Image (spheres, grey):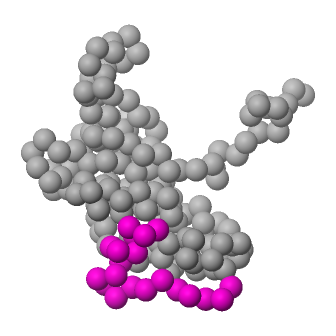
Amino acid sequence: MNTTTVDLSHATTGTDDLPVLSICAGPVGLAAAAHLRSYGLTALVLEAGDYVGAAMRQWGHIRTFTHWRHIVDAAAEKLLAPAGWTRPEAGVPPTGAEIVEKYLEPLAAVFGPSVVTGVRVVAVSRDGLDKSRTLGRDERPFLVRVQDTNGEVTDIRAGAVIDASGTWAQRNPLGASGIPALG
C-alpha cells in the first residue's frame, strides 16, 4: 500500500489555510461546499462514486416527493446564477436523475477540480495524534485518508470535515436500536 500526502496549496487561500472537506458530492455535500465558499473558505468535495450524485443515480428513475424550491440550496443557487443557471420550475417533483443533471452537475462544475470523484474516505483522524495522545487535539488539523478506485491511498490534511455521505451504502440493519437481529 502506497501512502502519499497530497499538496493542496493550489486550493488554499493562504499558506496556513487548509480546505474544509465535504464527504459526498450529493445535494448536501455540494450545498455545504457552497456555504463554505460563501464564507470565503476553501472546500474540497470528495465523492466515492465515479460521478457527482452517485447514490442518486442509483434511484434516478424514481420521482421525489419534493419540489425544486425545496431541493435547491440558496447558497448554491447564488453560485450558479452568474453562469446563467436558474432553478427549474416544473410542476411535478423531479426524478433523482433530473436533480443530478439539472442541479448537481452544474453546481459541481462551478467548483471544478475541488470536486474529486472516485475516492473513498477510509479514515479520519487528527494529524500527528493517536488514541493515546490527545493533548492539543482541538488545535491539530484533520488527516483524511482516501483510497481511489485503483487502490492508491492518499492522506489529505484538512481544517475541518463534513460528513454528508448519508446512509445509502450503509443501510440500517433489521433489529432494535440499529443492532442486527439475533438469528
Image spot of residue 37 (x, y percent) = 28, 60
93 with respect to 47 (left or right): right
The front one of 109 and 31 is: 31
Specify whether residue 83 is painted magenta: yes
77 or 101, nearer to the observer: 77
- Left or right, residue 147 beside residue 41: right
From where the camera sits, is residue 118 visible? no
Q: Say above or below: 121 vs 74.
A: above
Tell me: residue 174, above or below residue 87: above
Q: How many marks?
A: 0
Q: Is residue 32 above or below residue 110?
A: above
* Vertical arrangement, residue 19 with respect to residue 105, above or below: above
Q: Is residue 53 magenta?
A: no
Residue at image position (45%, 57%) is 29
**Residue that extends furthest to the left in the rendered view of this protein:** 15
Q: Quadrant of the N terminus?
A: top left
Residue 177 placed where, x, y %?
Answer: 77, 31
The segment highlighted magenta reads 73-92
Quadrant in the rendering for residue 114: bottom left
Q: Residue at x 87, y 26 (%)?
A: 182
Q: Residue at x 29, y 41 (%)?
A: 158
Find residue 152 and report its horizontal and vertical position in percent. Answer: 37, 45
Residue 100 vs residue 84, the one in the foreground: 84
Instruction: Locate residue 64: give its quadrant.
Output: bottom right
* Residue 129 in sight in this render: yes
Query: The C terminus appears in which quarter of the rendering?
Result: top right
Residue pictured at 27% horizontal, 57% vertical:
39
* Relative image position of residue 103 (x, y in whole percent): 48, 76
Residue 4 found in image quarter: top left
